[in-house]
Amino acid sequence: MANPIELLQRFGKNFAISEIHEQKADLTFFKVPKEQAVRLLRELRDDAGYTHLAFLTNIDWIEKGIFTLTYMLHNYDARHSLGMHVDLERDNAEMQSIHGLWAQAATYQRELREMYGIRFPGSPRLDEDFCLEGWDQIPPMRKEFDTAAFSLERFYSREGRGTEDPREHMKGLLYPTHTDEPSSGGQ
Amino acid sequence: MDTQKYALGPLLNEGLSAEDRDLFSDARPVPYEPYPVAVVEKFVNWVRANSLWLLAFGTGCGAVELNPLMTARFDAYRMGVQMRPTPRQSSVFIIGGYASVKTLKRIIRSYEQMQGPKFVVCLGICPINGGMYWDSYNTVNKFDEYLPVDLYITGCMPRPEVLMAGVLELKKKIMEGRADGANRYVENFDWYKANQKRVIKDWNMPDYNW
Amino acid sequence: MQDWPVRIGYFLINLTIVGLYGMLLSGIVARTLAKVQGRIGIPVYQPFIDLLKNLGKRTAVSHGAMFYLGPVFRLAGGIGTLAFVPVLYGSEMFSNFNSAGDLLLAMYFMFFGQLGMAIGAGESGHPFSAIGVARGLGQMTAYEVPFALAIIAIVVQYGSLSINDIVAAQQGGILNWTLFTNPLAVIAAMIAFLGMTGYSPFDVTMAPNEIPIGPPTEYHSSYLAMMTMNRAVFAGAKLILFMDLFFGGATNLVELVIKTWAIYMVAVVVGAAFPRFRVDQSIRFFLRYPTLIGIAAIGYTQAVLLP
């Protein structure tokens, strides 16, 4: 099994792979453009031994105006994981479906459709409710969605709810006489 | 009891399609009065308190605290507690932690299928005020707006010992005849239904699941 | 021949005693199993409390006429089985309605209750009920085979279809019991008995973890109470039938309690020790060795006992 960096460099002849980042010995991230992503996934699965799709998730960069899809692949022989980032436009986000490569991806895509509003044309049962039933707001995991305000408006809050800083609270409970300043007299 | 108050006409079942509407009952639930003889009612309450059948429906993370309850270490069987897998036969509904809107729909269905007298025990802080999920888009914060609660057991998570103490407390309440959540539900039926329908947007079941 | 009212009165006394005994037995067994698992377990009177609780429920939902009739048929099956089984040998009060062919009637009633239950549970419309009924009937058909073969063997052996005659032939010493005169038939029948009681390995009908509790999924309140009562009566009747046929019957209540308890414990001990069979496994099991043993029992009776 080739070194994953070498592997990515080999694939880099045909694909615009960028931002290769070795997170750990068994985990490497890289980025490809949206148009090449599915083609590269197929080659990784069929030629490079990355046969397992561990998960498919999304990161919302609201400041940059992009979504970053993350495809996590795993190679059982090499015991190595590859994380593939794909940037999408945040508005009207749309991505090619990969349910033909991994059937279970359809479920992830359903979830992403529901939580972020990313469309995956052709993915089975894409528009059915997944976790939310009868959702009537913007997709809740998008960062412009204010969950606290929504929760107050929809579910109300019970009175008498307080917050404590855990550190200060436990310190007061466990060491009532202790102060953080060094004592002047010395021990 | 004031019978005029409940003669409000049949339920509309607007969530159902026209052909399905014939398949479901549109009768309103009615409140239950205690046996006329006080001694009998007292005896029956004692019997109810000593035969608590829990609905084995884990509605949240707290459900993991239910399983040790039946093991050799805690052995709730000796207090007359049993797990029943079907709502028809159980009398106690334990809300194990947070209730999401999707689960709430199933909780309501199961609760309404249980046969009275039935009791609801809320486990953990989440059904009380949302707990650590208070600002979540999908967790109901005040559970008692949707179903009548007979007993709260707070904590995150409560240990099985606390749950056992809760069972004993529930027994005490039942024996004193104070656990009348099912009647409260019926008496304030419209209020509960309005609250339920306010959060459950795709109401596609009958208004009361007989 | 006595007056009918008196005999019916005696039968009601029998029914009460057997019903109470059956309930108590289930409490004792639950407690025993709890001890095996290192727990304290339920109080022995817990089944009575549960029964009263179910009777004291305030509401009951019906799913149609057959839904009502299911538990009624089932209870009729339990009472019918008991009605034709003499509880104590030589006692007028505990002889029930035994007559020349009562063994056939008792066997018929054992089947009848299950069929009634199947129809009633089907009416409830719950899919788990239907699955449970299908499994239960399949398994019952399988264990009826060794049981019927064992019955045929002892009917041939004693030359009578009357349970009273069979008990009478076993009197006069422990070696006269069918257990010692025709052990093959007893082995076949006792394996069938394991299937009848519904403890594991043959509890796939109720299967608490996969098809919640099988046929009675939709039954509640007083229906469930009725079925609990039937369970008690039916268990008692079955135990007494087995005791009469294979273990020499009983001449007094103490002997009855000891013998039936011992027979029941066979099923309990096996149940505590073995995991559950799937339905195809259990059918295959019953149709293999127990059936062969049953056939061998008939051959043994014909070749060895009769000449």
Image (tube, rainbow, N blue to C red):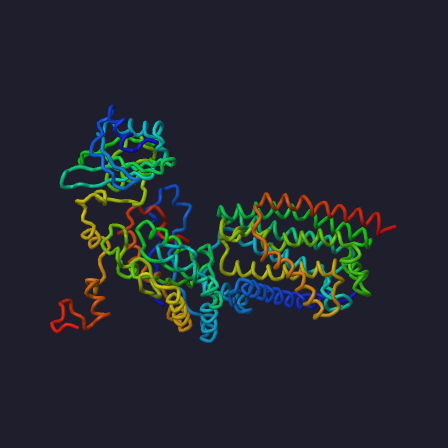
Residue in the foreground of this view, choosing between C276 and C245: C276
Q: Is residue B173 left or right of residue C104?
A: left
The answer to which quarter of the image holds residue B2 is bottom left
Please state, as top left, top right, bottom left or bottom right, where the N terminus of chain C lies in the image: bottom right
Residue drawn at the location 64% of the way across and 55% of the way down:
C77
Residue in the foreground of this view, choosing between A166 and C136: A166
Residue drawn at the location 75% of the way across and 52% of the way down:
C185
User: Outermost residue, front direction?
Assistant: A187
Residue drawn at the location 59% of the way across and 43% of the way down:
C280
Question: Is residue A127 something that shows in the picture?
Answer: no
Q: Is residue A62 above or below residue A31?
A: below
Residue drawn at the location 28% of the way across and 53% of the way down:
B139
Q: What x and y, as percent, mark residue B166?
A: 38, 67
Q: Is residue C240 above or below residue C140?
A: below
Q: Is residue C48 left or right of residue A20?
A: right
Q: What x and y, as percent, mark residue A164?
A: 19, 63
The answer to which quarter of the image holds residue B91 is bottom left
